[in-house]
Amino acid sequence: MSDRNTNIEPNTVDAIVRLLMLTVYADRVQKPQEMSAVLRLIPRLQVFADGGFFSDLQNLDALILVFDQEIRELMDESSLADEIETAIGLIDSPILIPMVLAAMRDIANADHEYHLAENAIIERAARTWGVPL
């Protein structure tokens, strides 16, 4: 993100959606309440998106499905730690960080079962971004 532009880069959009989906899968289960939270929260970032990344729900659904499939495949092969670190590292906007952190918390609380794995991702993000919890 440049100082002259308040729009987020495509790789940041991808990182945000990926990180939110990783929060959904932190406990290795996709729960409907958490997916509903993702679908409710991501469009709020549209104000920052340049070029219509969230121009309609069909594009948003397609992006979520891509990451959903990728993360499901990765779950069988790894702990997702590298994916989490990469996504967190791509988000560096002081405007977006609190919004993304709040979205992660909302997703983790959506099913009323706050898991240690969800907490670990949120704490890792907050620590990396230098944001107190």
Image (cartoon, rainbow, N blue to C red):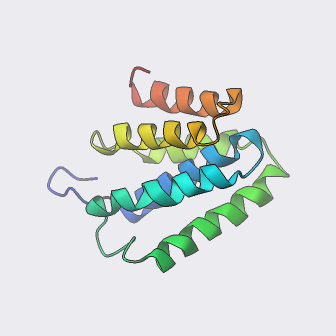
The picture quadrant where one finds residue 52 is bottom left
Residue located 57% across and 57% down the image: 36
| 3, 60: nearer the viewer | 60
In this rendering, position of residue 59 left or right of residue 48 = right
Q: How many marks?
A: 0
State the residue at coordinates (58%, 42%): 110
In the rendering, at what x and y percent does residue 32 appear?
67, 55
Apparent side of residue 50 relative to residue 41 in the rendered image (left or right): left
Given residues 103 and 92, the one toward you in this image is 103
- Judging depth in this view, the residue of 49 and 86 nearest the camera is 49
Whole-percent x and y of residue 78?
Answer: 80, 45
Q: Is residue 126 above or below residue 72?
A: above
Q: Residue lying furthest right in this view? A: 76
- Decide: is 82 above or below 73: above
Q: Note whether 67 is above or below 52 in the view shown.
A: above
Q: Residue at x 44, y 54 (%)?
A: 41
